[in-house]
């Protein structure tokens, strides 16, 4: 009996040590700025998308999308002649990428290998978030001005449907099984959209959160991470809409990322902070680190290979006094104009840059 108990104790200690070592291999509080790549150019910026197998980053940068090597920061190419690039969706199955151009009320289709533009698709007004849903095999854009979603067949580039959303949609996330969760910024709720029937299944309030923008998901444990502009992160059960937990965060949240291997949630804000939370269990989360970045660095991508975080920003000149709430109501105004940090001023020309955060080797 003593031998059995001793063996069990050793096994338990080894298991706990392994879990601690796995989290400590790149502990959240060790995230530092390790590289800066100056890309230059003018205008504001929005989403960052990583194509991990090809090591390409797609940075939405107003009139174009910069395509950058994720390992050395070199500029590979760009998708040009856009009016207001918001985001990029990648569909490997068809070798195509899709850019939401909010200023042109369209989606631009390009070849993933050559970056050559293949065509355009007319959408609703000001398409912002764009995602590929693997369950339905459709592209969805969420259109801020017309309060609807445009559904596109990625193979043919044909619009399949336009779905009324019932409010101003912000960012969305797919669960991989046919449900898309979308933040509705002006009604302070999340909607669950069936990607096959194209019907809204649920509408859930996000209180105490308001003006939600960013959203991410732990697909395995069915948890949504919703970033509100009232400086609140809301964690929600994706099956019944119940609020699991909330946390205070910085001003101007724009990106949430869930990293399943270490069970970490990353939240980036315009004031220059990354908040990091750890999932102890599906119903218990803890704040583990706050990393100071740079003002305006509100959009972010995560690299599973290196565990690096990519953000972009620029320097600012004073003079833009437009406040965030009023500008977001203007139909043709980029919600992230001037780097998405209206109170700071206008982004200086040629200072646009990519920031890489990780553990110093």
Image (spheres, rainbow, N blue to C red):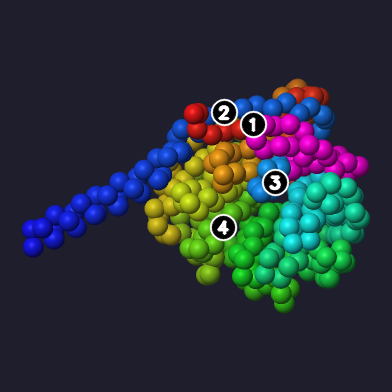
For marks 4 and 1, give the one nearer the viewer: 1
Q: Which residues are magenta?
A: 58-82
Of badges 2 and 3, the one in the foreground is: 3
Q: Real-space Cα distance between discs 2 and 1?
A: 7 Å
Secondary structure beneath disc 3?
Answer: loop
Q: Which tag, 3 or 1, sits closer to the chain's start?
A: 3
Marks 3 and 1, how far apart at CA:
19 Å
CA neighbours of label 4 inside 10 A, class few (<14), some (14 to 19), many (20+): many
Residue 67: where, in percent of width, then height?
77, 40
Residue under the point 81% across and 33% down? 43
Q: Which residue is mark 4?
A: 217
Where on the picture, by quarter, is residue 268?
top right
Q: CA distance from mark 2 to mark 3?
A: 23 Å
Given contact means CB atoms under 8 Å apart, are the residues at marks 2 and 1 in contact?
yes
Q: Which is closer to the viewer, label 4 or label 3?
A: 3
The location of residue 30, given as percent across then percent down, is 46, 32
Residue drawn at (64%, 59%) of the image:
173
Marks 2 and 4, the one that precedes in the sequence:
2
The residue that label 3 is drawn on is 54
- Which numbered disc flags the more N-terminal residue, 4 or 1? 4
Residue holding disc 1: 355
Instruction: Tell me which label, 2 or 1, sits earlier in the chain.
Output: 2
Within 10 angstroms of label 3, few (less than 14), some, or many (20 or more) residues?
A: few
The residue under label 2 is 33
Point out which mark residue 74 bears. Answer: none
First of labels 2, 3 by sequence position: 2
10 vs 247, nearest the viewer: 10
Distance from the alpha carbon under mark 4 to that under mark 3? 24 Å
Distance of label 4 from label 1 (alpha carbons): 24 Å
């Amino acid at each position: 009996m003593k031998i059995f108990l001793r063996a069990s104790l050793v096994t338990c200690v080894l298991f706990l040590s392994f879990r601690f070592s796995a989290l400590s291999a790149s502990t959240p509080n060790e995230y530092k700025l390790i590289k800066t790549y100056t890309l230059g150019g003018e205008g504001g910026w929005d989403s960052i998308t990583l194509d991990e197998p090809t090591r390409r980053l797609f940075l939405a940068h107003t009139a174009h999308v910069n395509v950058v090597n994720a390992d050395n920061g070199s500029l590979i190419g760009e998708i040009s002649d856009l009016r207001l690039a918001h985001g990029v969706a990648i569909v490997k199955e068809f070798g195509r990428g899709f850019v939401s151009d909010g200023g042109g009320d369209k989606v631009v289709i390009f070849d993933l290998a050559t970056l050559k533009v293949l065509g355009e698709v007319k959408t609703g007004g000001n398409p912002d978030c764009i995602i590929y849903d693997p369950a339905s095999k459709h592209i969805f854009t969420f259109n801020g001005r017309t309060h609807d979603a445009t559904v596109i067949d990625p193979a043919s580039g044909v619009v399949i449907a336009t779905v009324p959303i019932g409010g101003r949609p912000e960012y969305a996330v797919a669960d991989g099984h046919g449900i898309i969760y979308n933040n509705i910024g002006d009604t302070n709720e999340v909607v669950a959209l069936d990607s096959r029937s194209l019907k809204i299944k649920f509408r859930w309030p996000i209180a105490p959160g308001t003006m939600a923008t960013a959203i991410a998901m732990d697909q395995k444990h069915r948890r949504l991470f919703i970033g509100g502009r009232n400086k609140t992160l809301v964690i929600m059960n994706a099956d019944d809409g119940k609020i699991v937990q909330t946390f205070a965060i910085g001003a101007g949240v724009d990106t949430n990322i869930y990293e399943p291997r270490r069970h970490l949630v990353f939240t980036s804000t315009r004031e220059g902070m990354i908040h990091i939370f750890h999932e102890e269990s599906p119903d218990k989360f803890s704040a583990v680190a706050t990393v100071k970045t740079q003002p305006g660095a509100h959009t972010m991508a995560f690299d599973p290979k290196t565990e690096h975080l990519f953000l972009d920003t620029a320097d600012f000149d004073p003079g833009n006094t437009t406040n965030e709430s009023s500008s977001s109501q203007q139909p043709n105004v980029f919600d992230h104009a001037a780097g998405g940090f209206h109170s700071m001023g206008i982004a200086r020309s040629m200072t646009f840059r990519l920031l890489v955060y990780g553990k110093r080797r």
